[in-house]
Amino acid sequence: MSDIWGYQPTTGYTAGGSLVGFKVEATDGSIGKVDKHSDEVGSSYLVVDTGVWIFGKHVLLPAGTVTRVDAAEEKIYVDCTKDQIKDAPEFDKDRHLSDLGHRQQTGDHYSGYRT
């Protein structure tokens, strides 16, 4: 994967569309709903509210983890397991969105699962 922070053209995502409230599906089940997203070129991501799943935390998912957006069903499918997401660097949406070091660490984490 060349760009972990960009939506791949095959996902079906249309730039400018809102993904807030969409359910997010890992390869092995649901992980929560989109709380915030960005489609800024080279810096696209999803912030997912995991609800009770990992104790109600938010997780940062680079847009490059998205494999498909189903607008009709309001679901986003990502190419990660629940454990890979749970093992990602801790995310605080009020501190880490603008933290380039955290973004690098998160990108490295998810890139490590790519071939």
Image (tube, rainbow, N blue to C red):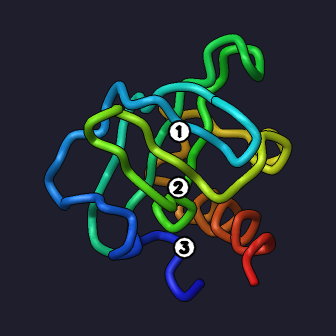
Most extreme residue toward the top is: 52
Disc with the residue nearer the chain's start (1 vs 3): 3
Task: Say which of 93 and 18 sits in front.
Answer: 18
> What residue is at 52 percent from the left and 36 percent from the top?
24
Q: Residue 99 bears which disc, if any?
A: 2
Q: Position of residue 59 (x, y in %)?
A: 61, 38
Q: Which residue is mark 3?
A: 4
Q: Which residue is mark 1?
A: 95
* Position of 98 relative to 9 (above/below): above
Mark-to-mark CA distance, 1 and 2: 7 Å
Residue type, label 1:
Arg
Indicate which label's residue lies in the foreground, 3 or 2: 3
Q: Residues within 10 Å of mark 2 (few under 14, many from 20)?
A: few
> What residue is at 54 percent from the left and 73 percent from the top?
4
Tell me the element at label 3: loop
* Position of 86 relative to 49 (above/below): below
